[in-house]
Amino acid sequence: MELIENIKALVEATKKLKDRKIMELVINVETSLLEFQSEFDRLRERTALLEKENEALKMQKEISRNLSYEKGVYFNTIHGDREGPFCTRCWDADYKLVRLAVQKSGIAQCPECRSFFEYEYK
Ligand SMILES: [Zn+2]
């Protein structure tokens, strides 16, 4: 950051003046600037985290809008294409859209939470 480089140069230049009061003021400004920089970095990281969470929430909202509950499982319809079945437990508890493994017997199992569902694919 150019501002920090400038303040460091100012501290060095002030040392040559040998004026105790000015030196004290410049060091106070440098300290405040470093604290500001630290807070700025913390807020930048926090903002990035919140943006990531916001994206995840938007995605959850979009999926929820297209999710339908049918015969104990979820289906997702996007652009007219129907996908599923998906585990209700994983979506309801963790917002994970996990496709169920459907067996010929009509039993489906979630590979994530291992829940079983009675399901007959039609
Ligand atoms: Zn599950």
Image: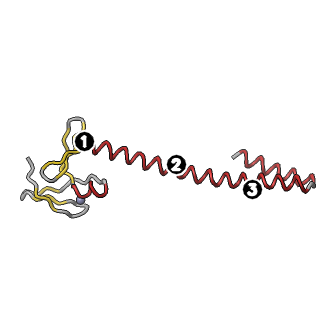
Query: Residue at the location (19% across, 49% down)?
Result: 74
Q: How many labels does the image show?
A: 3
Badge 1 local density, few (<14 within 10 Å), some, or many (20+)? some
Which residue has dot 2 on it? 47
Q: Is mark 3 on a helix, strand or loop?
A: helix
Asked whether the residues under the numbered discs 2 and 1 touch, taking CB atoms below 8 Å apart as contact, a structural biologist would say no
Look at 20% across and 59% down and name the residue there. 110
Question: Which quarter of the frame holds ligand 1?
Answer: bottom left
Residue 17 image point, x, y percent: 92, 52
Which badge, 1 or 3, comes first in the chain's sequence? Answer: 3
Asked whether mark 1 lies closer than 8 Å to ligand 1, one says: no
**Amino acid type at mark 2:** Thr
* First-in-chain label (2 vs 3): 3
Whether residue 34 sits left or right of residue 89 in the image: it is right
Which residue in the structure is indicated by mark 1? 66
How crowded pointer 3 is (Cα within 10 Å; few <14, some 14-19, many 20+) is rated as: few
| 32 relative position to 47: left or right | right
Element marked by disc 1? loop
The answer to whether 104 appears left or right of 114 in the picture is: left
Determine whether 39 is above or below 63 in the image: below
Whichever of labels 2 and 1 marks the residue nearer the N terminus, that label is 2
Q: What kind of element bears circle 2?
A: helix
Front-most of 113 and 93? Answer: 93
Residue for badge 3: 31
Quadrant housing residue 67: top left
